[in-house]
Image (cartoon, helix red, strand yellow):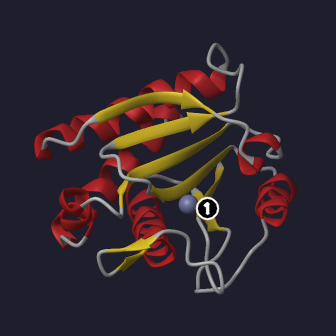
């Protein structure tokens, strides 16, 4: 059965972005645990997390973990900051015409299909030389799920129905991308 590695960003002494009473490390872990639960309920898959508690894990350690497992897919979970709004996804530069890009199309579309119901802006399918995208040996994607430091986005991230719906969209997107 395929192994999927979910990567809740930050943790421990690295909180990630903090604003509006939210900490990125807590949200990424909440969503990661929910996505794992949903994936395992819907599909025959082996889902692992790079961290399951509030601990600091290095970026190379996260990629090495997935590489050692021989995972089929690596999905990194983050939240944005810096004063924008909306959702964006990232893959490693130059991989848009490969399987990595095909999966990004599917997952990005599935998530935006959910988010557009809340009026969330689509910031696009992007590429970046992030360590976890560069060092993973399998297709990988990094999701920036709204802006913690923008009040409208933060209010959605505080809404448990929204978090469950977003987690469900991520899980369904992964399932469709992997043709599970
Ligand atoms: Zn982050």
Q: Position of residue 102 (x, y in %)?
A: 55, 21
Examine the image and state in which quarter residue 81 appears.
bottom left
- Residue displayed at 64% across by 78% down: 14
What residue is shown with label 1?
A: 7
* Residue lying furthest front: 83
Observer-nearest of 149 and 112: 149
* Relative to 82, 70 lies left or right: right
Q: Position of residue 177 (x, y in %)?
A: 49, 33
- Residue displayed at 76% across by 63% down: 62
Residue 168 showing in the rendered view? yes
* Relative to 99, 109 lies left or right: left
Up/down of 161 relative to 102, above or below: below
Up/down of 129 relative to 13, above or below: above
Examine the image and state in which quarter residue 31 appears.
bottom left
Observer-nearest of 109 and 86: 86
Up/down of 96 relative to 103, above or below: above
* Relative to 65, 79 lies left or right: left
Q: Position of residue 156 (x, y in %)?
A: 20, 62
Observer-nearest of 30 and 168: 30
- Residue displayed at 52% across by 57% down: 77
* Relative to 118, 9 lies left or right: right
Q: Position of residue 29 (x, y in %)?
A: 49, 74
Q: Ligand 1: which quarter?
A: bottom right
């Amino acid at each position: 059965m395929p192994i999927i590695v979910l990567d809740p960003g930050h943790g421990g002494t690295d909180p990630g972005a903090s604003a509006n009473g939210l900490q990125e490390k807590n949200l990424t872990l909440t969503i990661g645990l929910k996505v794992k639960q949903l994936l395992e309920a819907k599909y025959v898959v082996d889902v692992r997390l790079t961290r399951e508690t509030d601990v600091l894990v290095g970026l190379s350690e996260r990629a090495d973990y997935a590489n050692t497992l021989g995972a089929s897919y690596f999905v990194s979970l983050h939240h944005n900051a810096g004063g924008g709004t909306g959702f964006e996804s990232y893959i490693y530069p130059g991989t848009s015409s490969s399987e990595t890009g095909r999966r990004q199309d599917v997952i990005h579309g599935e998530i935006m299909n959910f988010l557009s119901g809340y009026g969330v802006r689509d910031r696009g399918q992007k590429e970046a030389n992030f360590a976890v995208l560069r060092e993973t040996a399998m297709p990988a994607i990094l999701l920036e799920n709204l802006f913690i430091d923008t009040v409208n986005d933060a209010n959605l991230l505080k809404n448990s129905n929204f978090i469950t719906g977003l987690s469900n969209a991520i899980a369904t997107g992964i399932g469709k991308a992997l043709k599970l």
